[in-house]
Image (cartoon, rainbow, N blue to C red):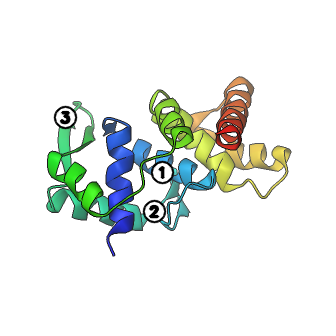
Amino acid sequence: MLEEHAKVVQFIGVADGITGRKKLQKMVYIAKKLQYAYKEKYEFHIYGPYSEELTLRIEELCNMGFLQEERQDKGSYVQYKYQMTDAGEHFTQMARVEEAEPSLVSCINLMKEKSSRFLELVSTLLYFDHLAKEDQIEKVHVLKAKLKFTADEIDEAFTFVMNLMNQRAVQ
């Protein structure tokens, strides 16, 4: 019943915490697009793919004490850091969530190293992965014009996705 909740707790636990709501949204979306078993529904919003379902799930998990949300005041904005609690670890064991496969652990760690801006680019490209590459790039330039992504950043994003896909296929 709460298996999807437990998978989110596990995801954050594997990452040893995630700083930023946007980053968390993008990381789970990318993992889902790589065919890992996440069922949250996503729609395209201002910062790219966004799941109201994931937002509510995170809020519930914090209320249940399985995740800790730390509010960090950065002056001009507030950032949130999420950590799995001891109760959350116990919850994943009780929910009998399978141990995260090595390729997922690697994927999470690689994504965690990237900025939320970069993950926004990657997730936007993946959201439009049904289009030709040139059309995906055009969508990024139109929808993310304010972010002024360079050709090098876009190439890096495509390379990053290919590396994640290859890692997924190998393991």
Q: Is residue 44 left or right of residue 69?
A: right
* Label of residue 125 in the image: none
Give above or below for 133 relative to 7. above
Residue on which disc 3 sits: 73
Inspect this view and state whether residue 61 appears: yes
The reply to whether dot 1 and dot 2 touch (C-beta < 8 Å) is: yes
- The residue located at (66%, 36%) in the rendering is 167
- 1 or 3: mark nearer the eye: 1
The reply to whether dot 1 and dot 3 touch (C-beta < 8 Å) is: no
Residue on which disc 1 sits: 28
* Label of residue 51 in the image: 2
Measure how far apart labels 1 and 3 are at the Cα level. 24 Å
Measure how far apart labels 1 and 2 are at the Cα level. 9 Å
* First reached walking from the N terminus: tag 3 or tag 2: 2
The foreground one among 3 and 115 is: 3
The reply to whether dot 3 and dot 2 touch (C-beta < 8 Å) is: no
Horizontal and vertical percent for residue 5? 33, 63
